[in-house]
Image (cartoon, rainbow, N blue to C red):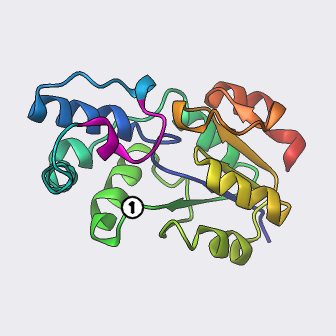
Amino acid sequence: MRKKIVVDIDEVVLDYVNALLKHLNEKFNMNIKKKQIKSWNITSYYPIPEEKLIYEWERFCEKDSFSNLRLINNAKEGIKKLSKYGDIYFVTYRSKNQKEKTEKNLENKLPSLWQEIIFSNRNNKREIYEKLNPVLIIDDSSEQIKNAIELGFNFFLFNAPWNQEIDVGEKRAYGWKDIMKRFYKYL
């Protein structure tokens, strides 16, 4: 049986935040940058009624730009290399109504390099980790990395402005090139 490697999608494989911010900035005539985002609670960065912001967020998810998010630098090479050592399982917070667009985007950009996309919510990623029993987890969420630590799984925390509060030492990854240099010792 092949080893299992769990990889988050947004901000680890696909550049979700820059595309979302571009959409919201255009709609609300603002200039919020990714480096300013210290939390996934995007509503706190825009002085807009929450309902209006959520509406625009949903509109973004319906757009072609959402269906064709660009890959994070070197993600294709990294996933390709990892897939030689184990089966790739993408585990994401995305809602199931985004399933078709997500699968199409990843199949276009990373054909035949992954086993499955598992759609989760914030509360059940831990259960998914327990069920899959992966040899490695790669995520940009501090919360999910804390779950990986508690469960005893090897991990890389993909560096992002919103995860600076957690100190994971050498297990913080500064991009896919960094992961490709160091992942062997965790398999």
- Horizontal side of 31 relative to 171 (left or right) equals left
- The residue positioned 12% from the left and 29% from the top of the image is 26
Residue 8 in magenta stretch = no
- The residue positioned 40% from the left and 27% from the top of the image is 34
From this view, report whether residue 172 is shown above or below residue 83: above
Q: Which residues are magenta?
A: 37-46
Please tell me in which quadrant of the rendered image residue 160 appears.
top right
- The residue positioned 28% from the left and 58% from the top of the image is 101
- The residue positioned 89% from the left and 41% from the top of the image is 185
Count of number-bearing discs: 1
Q: Position of residue 15 (x, y in %)?
A: 40, 36
Q: Nearest the camera: 75 or 53?
A: 53
Q: Nearest the camera: 104 or 124?
A: 124
Amino acid type, mark 1: Arg
Q: Is residue 86 visible?
A: no
From this view, report whether residue 156 is shown above or below residue 92: above
Crowdedness of circle 1 by 10 Å Cα count: few (<14), some, many (20+)?
some
Residue 41 in magenta stretch = yes
Q: Nearest the camera: 142 or 182?
A: 142
From this view, report whether residue 35 is shown above or below residue 44: above
* Quadrant of the rendering where the N terminus is positioned: bottom right
Q: Position of residue 157 (x, y in %)?
A: 68, 41
Q: Which residue is mark 1?
A: 94
